[in-house]
Image (cartoon, rainbow, N blue to C red):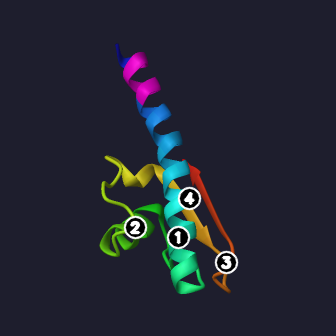
Amino acid sequence: ADDVLAGAQKSANVANVHQLSIAIELYYLDHSTYPKASSGSEMIKILASEKYIKNQPSDPSVFVYKIDEGGQNYNLSLK
């Protein structure tokens, strides 16, 4: 049962990466920069507070988010 649950969580996290990427791009269109955050959890808080996402992932700490110094590129992945 643990393997099934872990697999389901992994699938949900992969889907969340896709949804978060869309939200990040929408944020960029409005702000001409990607969210200025130092972690995945912080980036999710920014997107939620500005209403780019309605529901936050159950464990935001699994997301790794890095933005370049100019705010024009980012990387989002899973730990």
In magenta segment, residue 11: no
Give the residue pinned by disc 3.
Answer: 68
Distance from disc 1 to disc 2, alpha carbons, whole Å, reads 8 Å
Q: Is residue 55 left or right of residue 24?
A: left
Residue 79: x, y in percent?
54, 47
Label 4 environment density (alpha carbons within 10 Å; few <14, some 14–19, many ≥20): some
Label 2 environment density (alpha carbons within 10 Å; few <14, some 14–19, many ≥20): some
Mark nearer the N terminus (3 vs 1): 1
Q: Is residue 24 above or below residue 14?
A: below
- Could you tell me which residue is drawn at 41 percent across and 54 percent down? 61
Give the secondary structure at mark 4.
Answer: helix
Give the mark toward the camera: 3 or 1.
1
Give the secondary structure at mark 2.
Answer: loop
Based on the displayed image, in which of its 4 quarters is residue 33 positioned? Answer: bottom right
Give the mark toward the camera: 1 or 4.
1
Label 1 environment density (alpha carbons within 10 Å; few <14, some 14–19, many ≥20): some
- Could you tell me which residue is drawn at 48 percent across and 33 percent down? 10
Q: Is residue 48 left or right of residue 69?
A: left
Give the residue pinned by disc 4.
Answer: 21
Give the residue pinned by disc 1.
Answer: 26
Residue type of the residue flagged with mark 4: Ser
Tell me whether circle 1 and circle 2 mark residues in contact (CB < 8 Å): yes
Based on the displayed image, in which of its 4 quarters is residue 64 positioned? Answer: bottom right
Distance from disc 3 to disc 4, alpha carbons, whole Å, reads 16 Å
Q: Which mark is residue 52?
A: 2
Distance from disc 3 to disc 1, alpha carbons, whole Å, reads 18 Å
Q: Which region of the structure is painted magenta?
A: 3-8
